[in-house]
Image (cartoon, rainbow, N blue to C red):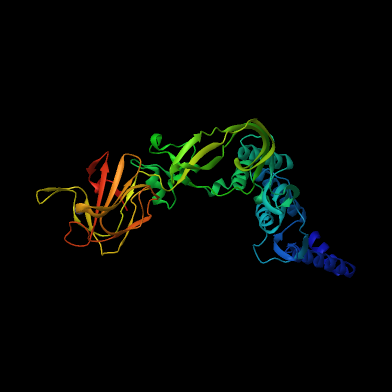
């Protein structure tokens, strides 16, 4: 009863009513504000809600730890993160793990890296300057074959800057990018393949394949071997310059001298040529191992060349040893047996008055009439051969005259024993008639 009367007394005491109201207001406010949280705002855009700000700060740290673990890089962000008190939709409050993922997606994390620039263009990013330097050294060695005097043709710089962590590559990958070896196309040799059929099937040539595959020889090629079909040019060109000394031949010159004791166009070597020799000092410039220039710095002659001297015949009246047709005409009678008689030459049918030319250079030893031959010219070529030109209408040379090959010596006709106008042409070797067709050239 006493308790009951105390409550009655409590309410009777009107002084307590404001205190109770204040207490109720406080409790309802506490209930109302407990539904509030913080909107996480990145550069003006809400990426989610968290209950406590320090949870979000912890989540950013965990996101950085994740990048460190995954990429081995210290990441930072320049993004502005703000927290705004808000009443999130039901069930939208992120826990720490969700918040970390939201930050990884929503924040622009950057890592400090060393970027290799080629002619002002970023080629590849590495984790630090040492990695970038070692990458460039390796590329130099690979492209120059280990030459100590190697330098890049392009402007190659290392710039330290902040990049997206995913942009930073490992050194192996960086080599591939710079050498473009990831763009290389290859072919695996099958049973029965030859370099030639591989080239045809892949739209290239065997020569190109041999140049790209210095270690592969057709004879030793085995199924399963890899043949490089195409190798793109690396992004960088390594230039090497080396001074070398070597001996070089000095080619001899050829001097021609006219010689009237030789028939026209006949040549004789008067003196054999001998190459000279010189000691050359030159700077050899190579690009990616391929010589592109050879700059001669000095030359020292060790021995002078000896010129070759050739005598060239100028004497048109001496025999060349080769007979040409004296006229152009139809062969009407061959050398040899004819109607039971020996025909000592060939007959070439030509109209009367056709110009008859000396078959070779020589000396006229007869020009006049000669029974069956009619009007006849004989030329002694001075090499054991004499030619006869018969049944002429007129001679244009006289005995003792020297004639050149091709000179007009007479006009054809129909004199002597003939059945019609033609030229009888005869070749005698040491006095014996031989078949002119075996000697003639047109
Ligand atoms: Zn005849």
Which residue is at 56% across, 39% downward?
A: 253
Q: Is residue 79 visible?
A: yes
Q: Is residue 290 above or below residue 368?
A: above
Residue closest to the eye, 205 or 244? 244
Image quarter where the N terminus lies is: bottom right
Drawn side of residue 233 relative to residue 363, left or right: right
Q: Please state the horizontal and vertical placement of residue 156, each as a whole percent of the image.
A: 71, 47
Residue at the extreme left: 340
Q: Is residue 72 above or below residue 333?
A: above
Q: Is residue 247 visible?
A: no
Which image quarter: residue 250? top right
Residue closest to the eye, 258 or 403? 403
Residue at the extreme top: 302
Which image quarter: residue 291? top right
Which image quarter: residue 18? bottom right
Drawn side of residue 395 relative to residue 285, left or right: left
Q: Is residue 211 above or below residue 408?
A: above
Residue closest to the eye, 342 or 243? 342
Q: Please state the horizontal and vertical placement of residue 302, each as a whole percent of the image.
A: 64, 29
């Amino acid at each position: 009863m006493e308790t009951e009367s105390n409550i009655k007394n409590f309410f009777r005491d009107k002084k307590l009513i404001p205190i109770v109201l204040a207490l109720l207001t406080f409790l309802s406010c506490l209930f109302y504000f407990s539904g509030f949280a913080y909107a996480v705002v990145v550069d003006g855009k809400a990426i989610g809600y968290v209950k406590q700000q320090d949870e979000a700060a912890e989540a950013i740290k965990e996101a950085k730890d994740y990048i460190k673990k995954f990429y081995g890089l210290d990441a930072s962000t320049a993004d502005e993160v703000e927290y705004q008190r808000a009443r999130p939709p039901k069930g939208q409050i992120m826990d720490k793990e969700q918040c970390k993922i939201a930050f990884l997606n929503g924040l622009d994390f950057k890592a400090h890296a060393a970027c290799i620039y080629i002619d002002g263009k970023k080629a590849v990013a590495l984790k630090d300057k040492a990695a970038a330097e070692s990458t460039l050294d390796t590329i130099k060695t690979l492209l120059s074959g280990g030459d100590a005097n190697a330098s890049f043709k392009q402007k190659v710089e290392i710039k330290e800057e902040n990049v997206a962590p995913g942009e930073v590559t490992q050194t192996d990958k960086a080599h591939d990018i710079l050498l473009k070896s990831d763009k290389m196309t290859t072919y695996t040799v099958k049973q029965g393949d030859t370099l030639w059929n591989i080239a045809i099937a892949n739209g290239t040539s065997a020569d190109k394949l041999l140049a790209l595959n210095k270690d592969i020889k057709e004879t030793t090629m085995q199924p399963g071997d890899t043949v490089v079909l195409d190798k793109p040019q690396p992004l960088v060109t390594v230039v090497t310059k080396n001074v070398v000394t070597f001996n070089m031949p000095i080619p001899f010159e050829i001097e021609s001298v006219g010689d009237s004791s030789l028939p026209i166009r006949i040549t004789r070597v008067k003196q054999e040529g001998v190459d000279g020799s010189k000691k050359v000092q030159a700077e050899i410039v190579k690009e990616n191992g391929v010589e592109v220039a050879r700059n001669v710095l000095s030359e020292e002659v060790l021995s002078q060349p000896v010129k070759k001297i050739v005598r060239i015949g100028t004497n048109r009246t001496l025999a060349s040893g080769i007979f040409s047709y004296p006229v152009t005409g139809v062969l009407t009678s061959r050398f040899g047996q004819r109607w039971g008689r020996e025909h000592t030459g060939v007959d070439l049918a030509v109209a009367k008055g056709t110009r008859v030319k000396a078959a070779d250079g020589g000396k006229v030893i007869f020009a006049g009439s000669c029974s069956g031959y009619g009007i006849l010219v004989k030329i002694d070529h001075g090499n054991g051969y004499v030619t006869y030109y018969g049944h002429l209408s007129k001679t244009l040379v006289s005995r003792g005259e020297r004639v050149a090959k091709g000179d007009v010596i007479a006009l054809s006709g129909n004199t002597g024993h003939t059945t019609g106008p033609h030229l009888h042409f005869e070749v005698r070797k040491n006095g014996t008639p031989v078949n002119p067709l075996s000697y003639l050239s047109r």
